[in-house]
Image (cartoon, rainbow, N blue to C red):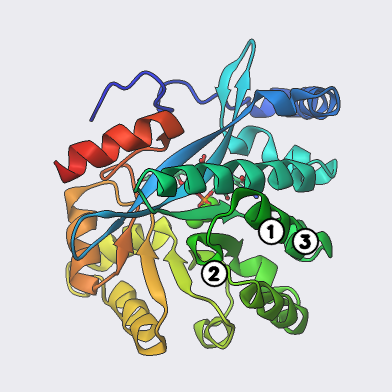
Amino acid sequence: AAKGSGRDRIHLFSPGLRDAARWRLEVANALRDGAQDQLVVHYQPVVRMDTGAIDGVEALLRWQHPERGLLSPDAFLSVAEETGQLIPITRWLLGETTRQAAEWASRGLALRMSVNISARHFSAETLVRDVRVALHDSGLAPDQLILELTETSVAEDPTRAEDQLSVLRNSGVRVAIDDFGTGWSSLAQLMALPIGTLKIDRSLLTAAQRLASGGQGAVLAAIVALTRTLGIRSVAEGVETAEHLQMVRDAGCDLAQGYLLARPMPASEIWGWVGRVEA
Ligand code: C2E
Ligand code: CA
Ligand code: CA
Ligand code: CA
């Protein structure tokens, strides 16, 4: 547990409910007036369970607000989505993250780069072009880029989703289903889609823990077994404790992500983190 300067544990601002309406207005105005320049990306390592080595990172947005400090995405993403700003922001983010991944790769650190894509962007015509432009400009190998989609954005219109996923797959990028277990889509339905990775929501770890007295994370193990049969990689999200990590190991998850392993951090700290872990 480093006390690292840029670590984002310190003060992620979230407005109280009482001020929610005023806050939304403030965010909408700021985004319109160019607050995009204040957006920063933090990266959270995703770790292989077999070797303990880093496999990739997930890019997570923060807003370096001049008065309020570092803002969590929960404080501004829904407003950005409503005002139509999230697509241009994500376009910028795709450029930034693919450039960063290509730069790490050129220094000998090849990491898969995961980027979150909103439901609206997923159903927009522009996504495929945005991805291709980012790959072209950065020179990053397409299979190093993973687009994270939530189950709901895929489940909304399965036929359309399948088409869009095929087009994306043809550009060589990979797709992950995010937050699995928070919606009600059937695993069988999701698995019929061309996806490479299933990210299991942290709520399942907590549920598994509750069952642990008899079930020993049986639900988690069953999901992981199914992904394995289908050749899909599984990631356990929200690994916070040694017990979680043991459960994830017992279930046979391929990869894990969580505060126990590493917090999200600025790009400049990733290099040091990898060196420390692999030393
Ligand atoms: P997510 O995609 O599920 O990302 C994982 C979230 O869990 C991150 O929160 C991360 O900091 C947090 N986390 C990681 N490990 C742990 C842990 O061990 N325990 C707990 N309690 N939390 C952990 P963050 O950065 O606040 O992001 C929240 C959500 O905002 C993300 O959830 C994602 O849905 C959304 N988001 C973030 N960046 C972007 C973006 O660039 N585009 C879009 N569309 N959504 C984004
Ligand atoms: Ca995600
Ligand atoms: Ca997630
Ligand atoms: Ca989430």
Q: Residue 272: give x, y in percent of width and height.
A: 28, 32
Spatial CA span between label 2 and label 1: 11 Å
- 245 and 149: which one is in front? 149
Q: What amino acid is found at the position of numbered circle 1 in the picture?
A: Val
Q: What amino acid is found at the position of numbered circle 2 in the picture?
A: Arg
Q: Which mark is residue 71?
A: none
The answer to whether residue 257 is above or below residue 170 is: above
- 96 and 202: which one is in front? 96
Q: What amino acid is found at the position of numbered circle 3 in the picture?
A: Arg
Sequence-first tag of 2 and 3: 3
The answer to whether residue 64 is above or below residue 109 is: above
Asked whether the beta carbons under mark 1 and mark 3 sit within 8 Å of each other, the answer is: yes
Spatial CA span between label 2 and label 3: 15 Å
Q: In this figure, which residue is indicated by the disc labeled 2? A: 174
Sequence-first tag of 2 and 1: 1
- State left or right for residue 270 relative to residue 34: left
Q: Is residue 182 at all visible to an observer of this figure?
A: no
Spatial CA span between label 1 and label 3: 5 Å
What element does badge 2 sit on? strand
What element does badge 3 sit on? helix
- State left or right for residue 266 relative to residue 82: left
The answer to whether residue 279 is above or below residue 10 is: below
- 122 and 250: which one is in front? 122
Q: Which mark is residue 129?
A: 3
Q: In this figure, which residue is indicated by the disc labeled 1? A: 131
